[in-house]
Image: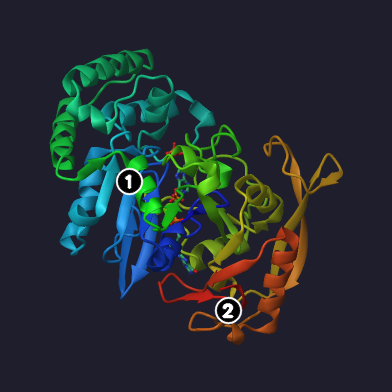
Amino acid sequence: MKVDVLLGLQWGDEGKGKVVDVLTPRYDAVARFQGGPNAGHTLEFEGKKYVLRSIPSGVFREGQVNIIGNGVVLDPVLFREEAEALEKSGVDLRGNLRISKKVHLIAPTHRLLDAANEKAKGGKKIGTTGKGIGPTYTDKISRNGIRLGDIYHNFDEKYSALRERHLEQLRQLGAEPEGLPELEKKWMDAIEYLRGFEIIDSEFEIDKLLKEGKSVLCEGAQGTLLDIDFGSYPFVTSSNTICAGACSGLGVAPGKIGEVYGIFKAYCTRVGSGPFPTELFDETGKTIRDLGHEYGAVTGRERRCGWIDLVALRYAIMINGVTQLIMMKSDVLDGFDEIKACVAYRINGEETRQFPYSIEEDIEPVYVTLPGWKTDMTRFTSEDQFPKAFKDYISFLEKELDTPITIVSIGPDRDQTIIRQNHK
Ligand code: GDP
Ligand code: IMO
Ligand code: MG
């Protein structure tokens, strides 16, 4: 069997959690391959809402295997909070969650370093989630990190060495390790809690599943435009959010990748700093934020809003090898008279359809204006009910992006999802 991958094509928060939950019944296992608690994946069903940060979005479906792969960075304290809340609501986590020994651990000092690094950047802040993501991946790459499997191998010694190095780094940044003893106590307790879960060599687990003819869905975090290599560097996260990240973040060979689901909103948002060519600073931007409830699931920060950017989407489709598109939050535009889509950038008077090296330059988006559909679609159950203007919008996007849109989401609930019949 193949491994399918679902990932965000914009700057995150496209609705990955919702769709993974919808697609999970088609799979035997769901696996996270990168990122950490900087992610906030929202799921809604049966009148309840859940936000997942490190735990895969397949956990609500009974009998599913859920895997946290080696490419993820895990904060034991936040993991414990998340897991305890899920267990309280009746999810059998101990039975169906497996964690790679090779995940890197986010220590309390990583979070302190994240804050200190941001402060030191002054006006050029990344606007990180403050979860210690950058410093933890930095330690991984510089070969100083600690992994979950280390709890079985001289953990205290490894932790002390890391702690000393971090304290020195904090001193150099002029930051005080405030409240560290209490943070460490909570962290150590959370590590003990983690011992109660299945900590495994997840690459072998996935190989075994595939050999048994089982199927795996990989759940991306963040989005392609936040990818460390291909995103809007340096305003990015510290991992490979793209499809290739699923190979390195789970130990899956490239040839095993099957479908690549690329997920995008019918408009565009970004949280944190960095360039955003189609950002709207007017009433329309505010209307999108209000109607789409565009506030961060993790930090509660206002998300910046703008029109859909097809230049960036084409790039994301290319980098990821997307085979199917999933359009989210189309209902947010239900009441609009007109909808705009950026089809090209004008840079120094020249028009281009190619995503440039830097989008920090002066970019003027070239827009096509399409008629709105002016129909409340939130209770629709089939694509046959779509008004003509909406069907035309879908066809326009499919042509521009040269990829089929197979699923359309018309509301936050699990049930507000239209699987397009001709693409089943
Ligand atoms: P993720 O990080 O990609 O999983 O996305 P988030 O959960 O951070 O943000 C997506 C938000 O949009 C959440 O609040 C979802 O409940 C909500 N959502 C998902 N799909 C839809 C949709 O089709 N319409 C509307 N109105 N909201 C949606
Ligand atoms: P999900 O999985 C949106 C952004 C931060 C910041 C940059 C770097 O819910 O889509 P980091 O803490 O990773 O070092 O921050 O990346 N960012 C996200 N934006 N959705 C996310 O995750 C994000 N995770 C990180 O706002 O700009
Ligand atoms: Mg999110």
The residue wearing badge 1 is 205
Q: Return the disc, 2 or 1, that comes first in the chain's sequence.
A: 1
Task: Give how far across and how far down residue 419 sits, in percent.
Answer: 53, 75
Give percent across and percent down for residue 11.
Answer: 54, 48
Q: Which mark is residue 269?
A: none
Query: Gap between marks 2 and 1, in whole Å?
Result: 34 Å
Quadrant of image for the C terminus:
bottom right
Residue in the picture at 30% in, 61% down: 64
Q: Amino acid at mark 1?
A: Glu
What colouring style does the render use? rainbow
Front-most of residues 199 and 316: 199
Residue 89 visible to the viewer: yes
- Vertical placement of 253 versus 16: above or below? above
Secondary structure of the residue carrying numbered label 2 = helix
Say left or right for 185 vs 205.
left
Instruction: Name the residue: 43% across, 50% down.
Output: 301
Which residue is label 2 attached to?
421
Q: Callout 1 environment at 10 Å: few (<14), some (14 to 19), or many (20+)? A: some
Q: Nearer the viewer, residue 186 or 361?
A: 186
Check disc 1 and report its element: helix, strand or loop: helix
x%, y% of residue 318?
Answer: 67, 48
Q: Amino acid at mark 2?
A: Gln
Relative to 281, is 110 above or below?
A: above
